[in-house]
Image: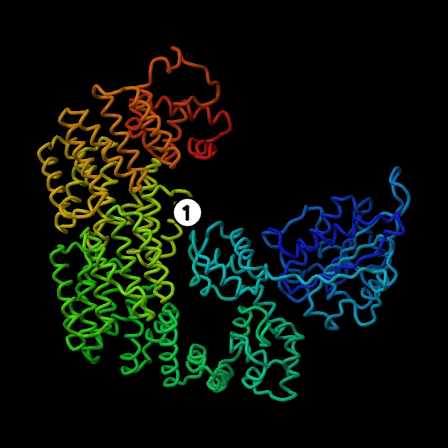
Amino acid sequence: MDTVSDEAGDRWLARVLARDATDAERAPGAALLLVEGPAGAGRSRLARRLLAGARASGVRTVAVAFSPFGAALAGSGGTGASPRPQGAPRAPERALPEGAPGARPASTPHDGGAPGAALPPTGGEHLTGEAFAAALDRLLAPRARGAGEGPGVRPVLLVAEDVHLADRAALRQLRRVLGEPPAGLATVLTYRPEELREPGLPLGHAARLPAGLAVQRLPLAPLDTAQVRAVVEEVLGPDCGPSELFARIAQRSAGNPQVAVDLARLLRDTGEHRERYTVRDLEAVGAPPRLAHLALARAAALPEAARPVVRAAAVLGEPVEAEELCAVAGVTGEAGTRALVGALRGGLLTEDTGGRYGFFAPPAASAVYAEIPGPVRRELHRTAAHVLGHRRPVPWMALARHRRHAGEVRGWLYAVEQAARERAAAGDHQAAVDLLEQTLSGPAVPLGARARLAPLLAHSAVLGLRSEQTVTVLRQILSEQSLPVAVRGEIRLDLGLLLCNQAVSGMQGRLELQQAVEELAERPVMAARAMSALAMPLLSTVPLERNLYWLERAEKTGAASGDEEARTSVAANRAGTLMYTGDPAAWAALEALPRDTDSPVYQQHVARGLCNAADGALWLGELGPARELLAEGVAMATRSGAAYVEEGARGTGLLLDWAEGRWDELPARARAFVAEVETMPGMAVDGRMVLGMLSLCRGEWQQATAWLTGDGPRDRDAVAVPHLAAASGALVRMALVREDVAAAAEEASDAWDRVRDKGVWVWAAELAPWAVEAALRAGRREAARGMVEEYAAGLAGRRAPASDAALLWCRALEAEADGEPAAAAALFREAAVVYAGLPRPYAAVLATESAARCALAGDGDTDAAVAELASCVERLTELGAGWDAARVRALLRAHRPAEDRRPRGRPGYGDELSPREQEVADLAATGLTNKEIAATLHLSPRTVEQHVARARRKLESRSGQTLSRGRSARGS
């Protein structure tokens, strides 16, 4: 990864090397580049890059690396490292620990440069005094050009690293060289500006830079968020976290490459390995040891008078004005100014663009904070609370932290309440949840304060992203019978919503909501919210009639309350309920929602209604309207701070992309989504569904089963009914391919019963065709016929194009089983047209394939049917459905015209795989058994065994690959 500083260094090097030293008029004289940056900023990396670039251009180089023990030198371009002069000291056996003042930062993963371009190691010979001066003069001595190169002196690049560690004699020698630089000399000096003996003067105040010396200063720019992401992904792998993670690492590292790398390594090496990391994971790892060592070493080197300011900055934990910092430190006036200047000179504190002062990297503050004695910390927090309490507006979040650590319980709880309300009003519900969880999880909070704070936590948790601790804390509070009944009802309402929406504990959530209705008898507005939540049909397998009962009660209660928010909340849930069930009245209900409201509270309700309606429209097959509703709902959720609604909409978006065939990068996005919402399985089910469906059509059946069924037995109350029906349809299909008809029929029967119990037949669109086929293949002709008629009756009066297409598919299966292939083909093609118009390209291809299959079985146009199959193979391949493409290709091969078939006799492929062997190898690489491959390709298991054996032998003899490696090598 090239940074802005890399590019600036490259331009400087190209400019100075372009000089023609033989042309006195054009030669601008010597050049000096001053590269400055804090520890870990990448000075060594840039130095190696410049040395490598010069050597690649045939330029002679001299490299110097300073350390507390002296200077190590090395040269290139016809000269090696200088020999150690008589009497020069050897390097000590020990080396400074990484991160110590004077120690060079370890290279970062994005270090560039050839191995030969490295600076001399600090563990080699170290020269001081006259020995260093003599060695440097010898390496810089002019060298005549080689034969054919013309007259003049060859240019030379001198790179001196860590000049802030050079002793006085070495600085004198560098000043002498640069005061009268040899012809063609280009010099690079790198240093930490915060550790210079004389601020801003790397060579000291005695340096004289002649007019002929072109001087340029290059401060190493901090990495931006995109560059930090690139650095972190080199450590943790691509797509290892959400964008918020990289933004937080950029903030915590202050854009310092080494700190960013160390934070990434802490994430990788601390705790359990995972594909995706979150901001919570980052907050848990603390300060990197290298950074902590550097901060503590600098603090120890400070004069005593400057230390109070540093301790105050560590306690404050954020940049503040100089007056506030000195007031907390207890040093004011000239003493405060001297202390602050000392802390700045010591490299611990820095000044930001707003004129505020804080630590050079935020984690460094926590390292220093941990070493402050407890009584001193407590007093500093008390002083900080007093000082910040006079700031306007009051920083309630910071004030709560200081009062807590100062032991001021009443003031702490008041600040917590104000901070939580402030964050919730600003839409930052997650910050409110984190603060309130931490506060209420301890036993020190009096009952009255718990009664005020618990409803705030419950409400913010519904709109934010919950944690297991939230549910635990709320249940603990509800167990306190001394709380007023109405307060318990308010808390229970939000707990029930949490369990239903995010925790996949549908029945528990329903029980909490029903009890909340009773406890909220004196609060009809909240009671209406609980009733409208009970009306949502996705909560459990409770019959639809019961959901509609609660919807009617909610509408009456909301209207009677006279409260506009209650009416808006009920209206939002009504629109979602009607859409989920395919009721045509849903569209009018959506139009009635107050979309033009400016109130964040109303916007949150409307956003929920729009996103629920989008999810419902998805299952109906109304994909275009679903995408429009989703975009509108997400925009409103973002404006109003409804994080849960916004995050849940991502899952609906994944399912929409699956249905519409937008499969590029979809697996990675779905895996990322599942990882990010791992504590909310009700939300993660969307991503798991997408991953299961994608795995199925690619032949990765073990993965498909794992994604679709989860880690344990499926609880009928644990997953929404449409998800259960779709997953069962996929499992039935896989069982049918395996010729396990009994298992397919059993799964189909159980799933059909679930849909019947619920009474929402529009949710059977992904189940019905496979369930009917399983019944027919099991010989249950009458049962299959009854299923089709029951399905048709359940769709009467509903607006659900996906189910309309599925019903056509089911009737086509009936016709095919009745020996009417022509009628079946016509019905399959009609279904394909409906699917294509939604659009659902994958379902359309499968229906077209079935139509062609029926045409080939009857008296239809064989050539047209074969052309249809060929088109299906092409479209499935484009989608990425490798297993389906192989399956249709096998069917096509059986019906290929005679003139297109290969000549009799086995062609010779040598050690290359034949087309059929490659097909078998590809399917075997997905984890399919030989029997499953045989069913897919319409071959006998024995034939598949032979193909597998030949493919394995060829791959292993050719390159040692396994079947799975062979597949990946082909980019499948």
- Using the image as rendered, state which of residue 894 and residue 259 is in the foreground: 894
Point out residue 941 in the picture as x, y percentages from the top left corner. 29, 24
- Asked whether the viewer can see residue 159, the reply is yes
Q: Is residue 53 left or right of residue 281?
A: right
Give the percent coordinates (x, y) of residue 323: 57, 84
Query: Looking at the figure, which quarter contains the C terminus?
Result: top left
Residue tagged 1: 668
Q: Nearest the camera: 960 or 928?
A: 928
Q: Position of residue 954 (x, y in %)?
A: 46, 24
Q: Is residue 887 above or below residue 56?
A: above
Badge 1 crowding class, 10 Å Cα cut-off, few under 14, some 14 to 19, many 20 or more, is few
**Residue 738 as seen in the image, left or right of residue 876:** left
Whether residue 98 is visible here, answered yes or no, is no
Amino acid carrying label 1: it is Ala
- Which residue is pictured at 74% across the width and 50% down the height? 14
Return the x and y of residue 961 as percentages of the image width and height: 47, 31
Residue at horizontal 31%, vertical 26%?
868
Q: In this view, does 776 lie above or below 517?
A: above
From what the image shows, is residue 354 above or below residue 572?
below
- Residue 837, picture quadrant: top left
The residue positioned farthest toward the top in the image shown: 904
Query: Picture quarter containing residue 890?
Result: top left
- As drawn, which residue projects farthest toward the bottom? 333
Q: Is mark 1 on a helix, strand or loop?
A: helix
- 510 lies left or right of 692: left
